[in-house]
Image: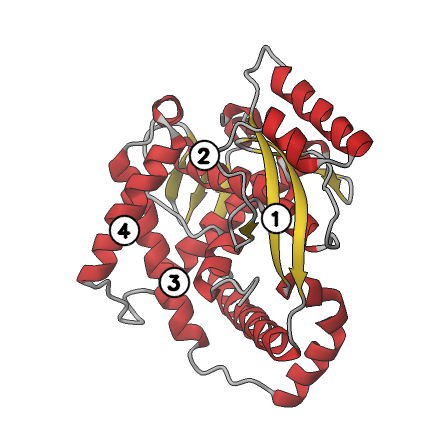
Amino acid sequence: MKRVISCLLIFILLIVSVACSGKGNVYVLTIDGTKISKGEYMVYLFEQKRSFEERGGIDIWDADFDGVSAEEVAKQNAINSITLVKAAVAQADSLKVELSTDDYSSIASESSELYKNMGQSMTESIGVSEEDIENIVREGYIQQKVYDLVTDGFEVNEDEFEQYFEDNYYNEISRYNNITVKQIYLPSDTEDSTANYDKIQEARAKIQNSNDFDAVQKQYTQSTKTDAFYLEDNMFDDAVEDALYQLPQGAVSDVMETGDGYYIFKIMSVEAADINSVREGLRAEYIREKKMEIYQAQNEQWQENMKITRNDDVYNAISIVDIS
């Protein structure tokens, strides 16, 4: 079913489930006397940067939210995520939360992938080891189990869900369509060049003038994927997918820039979703939202007794451009 993302994935995406023990003398904040190192904080911020750019593209950092820069929102989100995780982990013993052998296997795999994605220059510059990353992911798993325990008793209020469905059906229906697309792709430019950006703009202009997508694709694309393919969840950044789901059959997108390059898409076919699949998807989203409300409320109660102090000298010197 289209556009239904698992509760675990959304949960991780929304709160960035990572944490580790503070080390060293350079710290960003303290939580109940425990120092959260700059390296630990930068791992959180790395995940925030990736999440922001997946949703809004790399130009998201030019935006602001009610007068607050996107960068400052991301930095504060990183602190909120750390606090959320620490509050949950502090409850693990009393809730008798334990990790399984399979959990530890998944933790090792995921931490290795995260360490690899951050890159050697990044991890060295912030002083984070692969062992640190594994501890970060481990605490994320603990938090997920705490979340599951807190929300285990949730039951759907059917009348409330029907109202939710009615309120969201027409705005959300396009996200459940099945669509096939063709693409033109060029990789990202180096810092001192705009060659591929100029080429992709040239390609878009040629499509507009000739209305011959296939001919332009053959001339410009640097991808082996030239046939039409089915658009699946998480294939591209959220902002790209959301835009594509809004386009009608036969439409050609504007140039779209992501972390790996430049794209132009043509919508080859659109198969409208049936009402049952939309209902199923919206029901999953409704349950996710309600469970998150329950968990957030409980976690905020745990946080009431936590003492949190920010080290502004270090925090204010941190910039999103430090993460490359």
Marks 3 and 2 sit apart, C-alpha to C-alpha, by 21 Å
Quarter assignment of residue 312? top right
Query: Tag 4, which secondary structure?
Result: helix
* In this rendering, position of residue 198 left or right of residue 322: right
Vertically, is 5 above or below 119?
Answer: below
Q: What residue is at 45 percent from the left and 75 percent from the top?
A: 151
The residue type indicated by label 3 comes to Gln
- Residue 262 vs residue 30: left or right? right
What residue do we see at 36% from left, 28% from top?
Answer: 123
Q: Looking at the rendered structure, which numbered label has been put on residue 107? A: 4
How has the structure been colored for display?
Answer: secondary structure
Circles 2, 1 touching at the beta carbon (< 8 Å): no
Q: Which mark is residue 42?
A: 2
Residues under numbered marks 3 and 4 in contact, where contact means CB atoms less than 8 Å apart: no
What's the residue at 77%, 27% (across, down)? 205
Amino acid type assigned to the residue bearing label 4 in the image:
Ile
Q: Earlier in the sequence, mark 2 or mark 4?
A: 2
Q: In the displayed structure, would residue 95 be above or below residue 47?
A: below
Instruction: Give the number of the mark in front: 1 or 3.
Output: 1
Which amino acid, by three-letter code, is at mark 1?
Val
Camera sees residue 23: yes
Q: CA distance from mark 1 to mark 3?
A: 36 Å
Front tag of 2 and 4:
4
Q: Which residue is mark 3?
A: 144
Specify which label sits upstream in the sequence, 3 or 2. 2
Q: CA distance from mark 4 to mark 1?
A: 35 Å
SS at badge 1: strand
Chain-order first, disc 1 or disc 3 = 3
Disc 2 versus disc 4: distance between alpha carbons?
Answer: 20 Å
Residue 249: x percent and y percent? Answer: 72, 54
Query: Residue 114 is drawn in which quadrant?
Result: top left
Query: How far across and how far down the image is residue 33, in percent?
Result: 38, 45
